[in-house]
Image: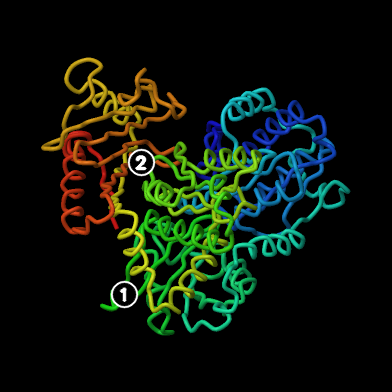
Amino acid sequence: MEFGTAGLRAAMGAGISHMNDLTIIQTTQGFCRYLEKNFSDLKKRGVVIGFDARAHLSSGGSSKRFARLAANTFISQGVPVYLFSDITPTPFVPYTVTHLKLCAGIMVTASHNPKQDNGYKVYWENGAQIISPHDKGISQAIEENQEPWPQAWDDKLIDSSLLLHDPYATVNKEYFKDIQKQCFHRNINKETNLKFVHTSVHGVGHKFVQLAFKAFDLSPPFAVPEQKDPDPEFPTVKYPNPEEGKGVLTLSFALAEKDGAKIILANDPDADRLAVAEKQESGEWKVFSGNELGALLGWWIFTCWKNHNRDTCAIKDVYMLSSTVSSKILRAIALKEGFHFEETLTGFKWMGNRAKQLMDQGKAVLFAFEEAIGYMCCPAVLDKDGVSAAVITAEMASFLATRNLSLSQQLKAVYDEYGFHITKASYFICHDPKVIQQLFDNLRNFDGKNTYPKSCGRFKVSGIRDLTTGYDSSQPDQKAILPTSKSSQMITFTFANGGVATMRTSGTEPKIKYYSELCAPPGNSDVEQLKKELDELVNAIEKHFFQPEKNNLQRKTE
């Protein structure tokens, strides 16, 4: 295993390439030494550690066990540890770092990965996930501290230590107090007849979403009974990932039909992501894409801000962020409304760190999102947060219902006003790193050495940005503005028809992902024609750039 900006993620089991007691001890020893080097007051401030409900019976590994071993490592060096006494959503860890002014945070989770996996996610003192050079510094410190320290395995020692603190009660109280700052329609919430179904997909989210609804004075959502309690086996789903589509929501649809609920809210197992589905007038269910929900939440959060800030000058300090592979809808809203929009590299580590920089300059960062159903709706958490996103979505839907509007109708209204943004994203599975490398090398040497494609089927390429090499054809000096990384593959193609498509490798899964978008100016309402054009563009990209048959790539299946 290699420690990167996403920390660690691998299957639980024996050996140095797996998550187990030894690799957790080694990682934490390295992290502890690195923090000692960076913070002279580490022994005063301390760290927070949280965990989800994952467990691996055959190896004895579990998120709780790993969290306790990590706590033991820090306490053995005199560092105070705020260890949650029970499972929590991932966003509670960055929240605690900021709220208690700690040096760092660790969350033991593999999010929505398959059941055999676990992970180790790290936050810096600013409450955001680590970015370079911290990953390299921690990785080096791990290499230098591989032999377990005395009593490294004996996690019972922490129970009698005065350095062990439990932030569970405090954080539960303070977090729900803080997210209420995003509650703008309490009276509507109290009165609404709209019914919601919630699923935590066998993860940690159930209790916390119930509490969030209570904090907003909303009636509690109906919980999918088969999925509400944590279960490391994830018995009712093939993949515990609401992003995978309707398969994960089968039980939610059934409960919603039974109880007359119009809207489904689904968290992934560590409750940092949110998927939303709505029953249409036809009786069909529409599952919103991450980009569509990003458009709705962006519109809603800005509308609420505008209604509570009559000072027109204040807008110059308002920002929204999204990742470079997400829809540019926030850019369109920002241009028309007069606030700032910035895009970052893929992943909330970039958006969280940029948001903190802006906030430190006195700016208001209202919202950030990525198309992978991740939303930061509340400045108290500088990471994606599926709990606050769920309750804010519920308030938005309740408000719209008083205007006889559905989420789908409001989404169309947003596109009518700011221009249609049609997106399509998917992935291919490839377990052979050599094939992935060759695929991207071919794109960089398409018509001879160092030449990128000039067309893709009938679609003319008008611009290339390669964030692996740092090349950007649109810049005067041909150098990309966003940071580059040689360790991951990422190329963005701009097409003459206004389409944009990005191909990139995943940092945590054996996938080559693609993201495509066609943006139309306000007033172009021929949505079907736009969708047809984007479908044809995506088919051409798959055929000419991915070459799935030649490269033996496995398509995403429902």
Residue 112: give x, y in percent of width and height.
48, 53
Identify residue for label 2: 511
Q: Is residue 313 above or below residue 469?
A: below
Image-quadrant location for residue 132? top right
Mark 1 burial class by Cα count in 10 Å: few <14, some 14-19, many 20+: some
Provide the secondary structure element on which disc 1 rests.
loop
Of residue 171 and residue 4, the one placed in the foreground of this image is 171
Q: Position of residue 43 (x, y in %)?
A: 83, 37
| Quadrant that contains the C terminus | bottom left
* Residue situated in front as seen by the camera: 538 or 341: 341
Q: Farthest top residue?
A: 449
Q: Which residue is mark 1?
A: 280
Amino acid type shown at disc 2: Lys
Query: Regarding mark 2 in the picture, which secondary structure is present there?
Result: strand
- Marks 1 and 2 sit apart, C-alpha to C-alpha, by 32 Å
State the image coordinates of residue 481 (x, y, percent, origin top left).
43, 27
Residue 47 sits above or below residue 493 on the image? below
Front disc: 1 or 2: 1
Left or right of residue 292, residue 499 in this image: left
Q: Nearer the viewer, residue 176 or 226?
A: 176
Q: Residue at x 52, y 76 (%)?
A: 221
Are the two marked residues, 1 and 2, in contact with CB atoms closer than 8 angstroms?
Answer: no
Image label count: 2
| Mark 1 or mark 2, earlier in chain | 1
Q: Is residue 249 left or right of residue 128?
A: left
Asked if 267 appears above or below 43 in the picture, the reply is below
Question: Looking at the picture, which amino acid does disc 1 mark?
Answer: Gln
Name the spot of residue 294 as percent of width and height, x first: 43, 55
Query: Which residue lies at the image location 60% right of the left edge and 63% below the top edge?
Result: 182
Disc 2 packing (10 Å; few <14; some 14–19; many ≥20): many
Q: In the orientation shown, which residue stands out farthest toward the left?
A: 458
Which is more toward the observer, 23 or 551?
A: 551
